[in-house]
Image (cartoon, rainbow, N blue to C red):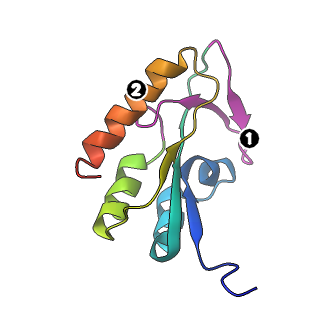
Amino acid sequence: MSGYWTNKEIHSGNFRCVCADPLNTSAVLISRVANVHLKDWSLTPHPTDGSFLASDGTRLYCSAVGDGIMPNAEILRLLTAVGYGGPLTVELHGPSDPRTCLKASREFIVRQLPKY
């Protein structure tokens, strides 16, 4: 089992789903992060739903990364500060126009990480 729990994934959206503070949880994992998976949530319903009920009862709606309530800019700044250059993925489900949502997510990430 050598190395079983040595590398971690920052999964910003899921931290909120279980009511863990996304920024503080990311800071704890940052020294051993092997993958970053970004998701964003809105509190505003949209017609295609794509929602999730968080463990505190809050209904969360998928949105473009950078358009919702997640501290993704702060998480990306934290990654920049430690020199992270590994994989970065985006998860979208439920937006009415996934191409527009993906484009907005990419533009947000590029603004935060211009040298990535």
Q: Nearer the viewer, residue 68 or 32?
A: 32
| In the image: residue 57, left or right of residue 35 | right
Give SS at disc 1.
loop
Q: Nearer the viewer, residue 65 or 98?
A: 98
Q: Which of marks 1 and 2 is nearer the N terminus?
A: 1
| Image point (59%, 30%), residue name | 62
Q: Magenta residues?
A: 47-69
Residue located farthest toward the left when viewing the structure as drawn: 115
Count of labels in the image = 2
Spatial distance from mark 1 to mark 2, Cα to Cα?
30 Å
Q: Where is residue 95 in the image (x, y as percent from the top left)?
A: 58, 21
**Prevalent SS, magenta region:** loop
| Image point (38%, 35%), residue name | 106
Q: Mark 1 points at which residue?
A: 57
Give SS at disc 2.
helix
| Image point (35%, 42%), residue name | 109
Res 91 quadrant in image: top right
Q: Mark 2 points at which residue?
A: 103
Residue located farthest toward the bottom when viewing the structure as drawn: 2
Mark 1 or 2: the one toward you: 2
Which amino acid does the dot numbered 1 rest on?
A: Gly
| Residue 114 lies in the magenta stretch | no
Instruction: Using a 10 Å C-alpha cutoff, classify the residue at mark 1 as few (fewer than 14 neighbours), some (14 to 19) or many (20 or more).
Output: few
Which amino acid does the dot numbered 2 rest on?
A: Lys
| Residue 62 lies in the magenta stretch | yes
Instruction: Using a 10 Å C-alpha cutoff, classify the residue at mark 2 as few (fewer than 14 neighbours), some (14 to 19) or many (20 or more).
Output: few
Q: Position of residue 49 (x, y in %)?
A: 68, 20
Q: Where is residue 42 in the image (x, y as percent from the top left)?
A: 54, 31
| Image point (43%, 61%), residue name | 86
Q: Position of residue 70 (x, y in %)?
A: 48, 44
